[in-house]
Amino acid sequence: MGFAQTMQHDANTVELDRIIIFPPCERKGIGTKLLQHTLLDQKQKGVENIIVNAGKEEIHARRFYEKNGFKQIREATIETPWGKKLTLVTYQLILEHNKH
C-alpha cells in the first residue's frame, strides 16, 4: 500500500520526510488515512509542529498538504548534489493539544 517516514528535529518538531503510496493504491484515500495516522501518532508523542517540503513543481503533493491543513511558511531554491537548482516549498502544521 505505502508508508510514511518522519524525522525528529527537536522535542516539538517532526519533519514528514515522505509519504509514499504504491501506484495500484493511489487515489483511494490511503495517503490521507496514512497522514491522519501519522499526525495522531506524533500528537500522542507530544509533538507540536509538523513540517514537510515539496518541490514547487509538485502541484499534486502541494495540494494534498494544503487540503490537509498545512500552511506554506517558506520557499527556497537549493543547489542539488547533481548540480541542478530545485525550488522547495516548506509547509507547517501546528498540532492542537487538549489542555487538561
Image (cartoon, helix red, strand yellow):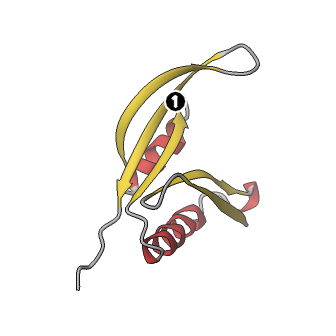
Q: Nearer the viewer, residue 56 or 22?
A: 56
Q: Is the N terminus in the top left, top right, bottom left or bottom right quadrant?
A: bottom right
The residue to which callout 1 is attached is 88
The percent coordinates of residue 76 (x first, y second) are 46, 24
Q: Is residue 72 left or right of residue 35?
A: left
Amino acid found under the numbered disc labelled 1: Leu
7 in relation to 76, above or below: below
Task: Farthest residue to the left: give it.
Answer: 100
Q: Nearer the viewer, residue 22 or 95?
A: 95
Residue at the (39%, 48%) spot, across then down? 92
Q: Nearer the viewer, residue 31 or 18?
A: 18
The percent coordinates of residue 78 (x first, y second) are 57, 21
Q: Is residue 95 left or right of residue 7?
A: left
71 in relation to 6, above or below: above
Q: Nearer the viewer, residue 79 or 27?
A: 79
Q: Residues within 10 Å of mark 1 (few under 14, many from 20)?
A: some
The percent coordinates of residue 36 (x first, y second) are 48, 69
Residue at the (42%, 60%) spot, across then down? 12
Q: Is the C terminus in the top left, top right, bottom left or bottom right quadrant?
A: bottom left
Residue at the (47%, 41%) spot, across then down? 62
Task: Farthest residue to the front: give it.
Answer: 11
Quadrant housing residue 6: bottom right
Residue at the (76%, 18%) spot, across then down? 82
Number of numbered callouts drawn:
1
SS for callout 1: strand
The percent coordinates of residue 3 (x first, y second) are 69, 63
78 in relation to 6, above or below: above
